[in-house]
Amino acid sequence: MSTETQTVQTESINFKDFDKGYAPFTEALRSLGFDWQIARTEDLKGFCRVHGSEPQLFFRLPAAGPGQAEATESAVLSDLWSGISETLAVIRQKQPGKLIKVRSMQLDGSTLTFSVS
């Protein structure tokens, strides 16, 4: 794990529309130093901090193991995108009518924490 966790602002990323938001999302992850190959050996975890609360685990992507399809950059990034997008859908369902956006993301090794409000 790194000693200093960087944060990237993500308010401009559209997590509802894959075609509009995927490229900025991958750029944001890369700016945090994300190396997709970590998914070959470690589970990727997605924690969500809603309205400043303590981060909660919302999804876990298992490491690619024997007998599974080989991890590719595209597959790993798409799986992370889906995890965040589905998390937002759950949160929006609980708070209908409210604008819910991912405001920032932090990466610490194989753990991605995103703040939502």
Image (tube, grey):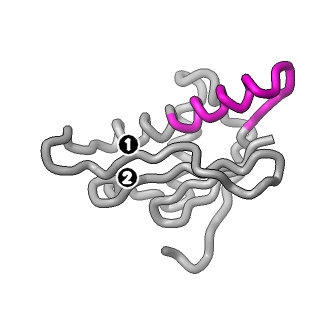
Q: Is residue 18 magenta?
A: no
On the image, the x and y values in percent for residue 110 come to 45, 60
Looking at the image, which residue is at 26% across and 44% down?
Answer: 71
Amino acid type of the residue that numbered disc 1 sits on in the rendered structure: Val
Q: Which mark is residue 76?
A: 1
Question: Residue 72: where, in percent of width, then height?
Answer: 28, 42
Dot 2: few (<14), some (14–19), or many (≥20) neighbours within 10 Å? Answer: some
Distance from the alpha carbon under mark 1 to that under mark 2: 6 Å
Kindly identify the residue that appears in the image at 52 percent across and 75 percent down: 2
Single out the residue that lies furthest toward the left: 67
- Vertical comparison of 7 with 101: above or below: below
Depth check: give the residue in front, 85 or 17. Answer: 85
The answer to whether residue 94 is above or below residue 32 is above
Magenta range is 83-101
Please name the amino acid that badge 2 sits on: Trp
Residue 80, image x and y in percent? 48, 41
* Residue situated in front as seen by the camera: 49 or 18: 49
What secondary structure is the magenta-colored segment mainly?
helix
Tell me whether the residue at label 1 lies in contact with that at label 2, contact meaning CB atoms closer than 8 angstroms.
yes
Q: Quadrant of residue 15?
A: top right
Question: Which of the image's four quarters has the C terminus?
Answer: top right
Callout 1 secondary element: helix
Give the residue at x 52% y 37%. 83
Q: What residue is shown with label 2?
A: 36
Mark 1 or 2 closer to N-term?
A: 2
What residue sits 85% from the left and 19% below the top?
97
